[in-house]
Image (cartoon, rainbow, N blue to C red):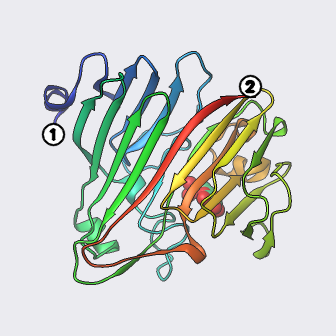
Amino acid sequence: MTLTELNQRFAISNHVQFKEIADGIIIAEISNQHGNCNITLQGAHVATWQPRGQEPVIWLSPYAKFAPGKSIRGGVPICWPWFGPHATDAKLSGHGYARTVQWEVLETKALPDDTTFLRFGLVESDATRAQWPHPSPAQLEVTIGKTLRITLITQNNSQESFILGEALHTYFNISDVAKMKIRGLEGCDYLDKVGEPARRTQQDAIVIDSEVDRVYVDTEADCVIEDAGLKRAIRIAKSGSRSTVVWNPWTEKANKMGDFGEHGYRGMVCVESANAFDNLVTVKPGETHRLVVEYSLEAI
Ligand code: BG6
């Protein structure tokens, strides 16, 4: 669909319009009384969310690349239909292909309380089928209101079960990594991916002062990022997700990545609502699986 057709069919005045921000990269620009949000059609990638009168809640690197087939550093990348490296084929992209392929707009709606709703569908192609043979249309629903609610839907339309790994790999904007704590994972077991992989148990709130790359398993708990610098907490509520990934690359890794900037890692933390490692999901024929997150702000 061309940009003009998209706007004719799906734009809603005072809610949603579509724009081309780089060659081949179209965004849905959402603005309502609650705040602003941008979503790229490539990857159905929520790139920004800023509630009115607040600093952005979602972090987007100033060095993020917006180009066909490239993943965006920041926002809410969709890891799907596997998380991390592919189980058997190291040539396939880490975190799956959903974040770098085109999605189509299926629906836009203005809801009575001035909330905006959008629904996207992943466009399957020969390239996606070569990586994932199961007919299993993925959809993403995004509701932008007082909170940001995102639902990743996987439908198994095949005759066989498949095993799904996934994450909403959200980068949260924080004042400074030294001024924040993450609560909600105390007592949980996690796979520590920094250095030799090891299984550990989280004792207290998470404080980050070096590289952190952890997959917390068997947890459906809310997480709260307490940010003393911005005097606010970000609450992450979820359902259909039994893993939570916490990631900050710290200096050396961020420098190697080339799209963080020199101090970018200090202003972000990823708290990803996932199904990974011990918590992969078996989706049976005809079943629909939903991973839902809802982000909100609280004063502290
Ligand atoms: C996290 C992984 O989810 O994503 C990390 O646990 C990884 O190991 C990070 O480095 C970023 O991945 P990418 O592919 O977006 O650079």
Q: Is mark 2 within 8 Å of ligand 1?
A: no
Q: Secondary structure at mark 1?
A: loop
**89 displayed left or right of 53:** left
**145 displayed left or right of 83:** left
Corner quadrant of residue 232: top right
Amino acid type for the residue under numbered disc 2: Leu
Q: Earlier in the sequence, mark 1 or mark 2?
A: 1
Q: Are marks 1 and 2 in contact (CB under 8 Å)?
A: no
Above-or-below relation of 86 to 256: below
Corner quadrant of residue 262: top right
* Neighbourhood count class around disc 1 (C-alpha, 10 Å): few under 14, some 14–19, many 20 upward: few
Residue 296 visible in this rendered orientation of the protein? yes
Identity of the residue drawn at 76% across and 57% down: 212
Percent x, y of residue 16: 30, 25
Q: Could you tell me which quadrant the N terminus lies in?
A: top left
What residue is disc 1 on?
1
Residue 259 visible in this rendered orientation of the protein? no
Percent x, y of residue 133: 28, 76
Q: Nearer the viewer, residue 231 or 270?
A: 231
Percent x, y of residue 17: 28, 24
Q: Secondary structure at mark 2?
A: loop
**210 displayed left or right of 86:** right
Q: Could you tell me which quadrant the C terminus lies in?
A: top right
Above-or-below relation of 184 to 219: above
Figure quadrant, ligand 1: bottom right
Amino acid type for the residue under numbered disc 1: Met
What residue is disc 2 on?
230
Above-or-below relation of 86 to 34: below
* Neighbourhood count class around disc 2 (C-alpha, 10 Å): few under 14, some 14–19, many 20 upward: some
Identity of the residue drawn at 23% across and 23% down: 12
Marks 1 and 2 sit apart, C-alpha to C-alpha, by 41 Å
Identity of the residue drawn at 56% across and 56% down: 273
